[in-house]
Amino acid sequence: MGATRFPDDLVQTRHAGNATYDALAAPHRRDITALRRLLHLSVRLWWHPYWDTARSAPAAPTELRQLARTQ
């Protein structure tokens, strides 16, 4: 791992998605705004131009998730 170079905005979006997901996982948390934010971030991740132009390995989304968690 670590061989793939992801754009900074893609890593930041994944990091924000992780943080939002973690906040929603807190006990007794009901936050519609956070759910909408998570949906918005998920769409941004899915449709990021990087996935169209890069020859990414099948493990690239997992690598991105791990990279975002370490930062």
Image (cartoon, rainbow, N blue to C red):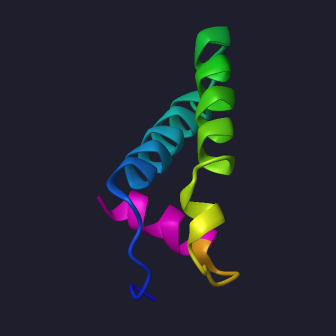
Query: Residue 47: x percent and y percent?
Result: 67, 46
Look at the image and tell me whether residue 28 can be seen. no
As drawn, the residue found furthest toward the front would be 53
The residue depicted at 52 percent of the width and 74 percent of the height is: 63
Badge count: 0
The residue depicted at 68 percent of the width and 49 percent of the height is: 46
**57 up-or-down from 37: above or below:** below
The residue depicted at 52 percent of the width and 62 percent of the height is: 65
Query: Residue 28: x percent and y percent?
Result: 65, 18
Look at the image and tell me whether residue 35 can be seen. yes
Query: Residue 61: x percent and y percent?
Result: 61, 68
- Depth check: give the residue in front, 8 or 30: 8
The residue depicted at 65 percent of the width and 40 percent of the height is: 42
- Depth check: give the residue in front, 22 or 39: 39
- Secondary structure that dominates the magenta span: helix
Q: Verify whether residue 39 appears in magenta.
A: no
Image quarter of the N terminus: bottom left
Magenta-drawn segment: 61-71
**36 up-or-down from 4: above or below:** above
**49 up-or-down from 52: above or below:** above
As drawn, the residue found furthest toward the left would be 71
Query: Residue 25: x percent and y percent?
Result: 62, 35
Image quarter of the C terminus: bottom left
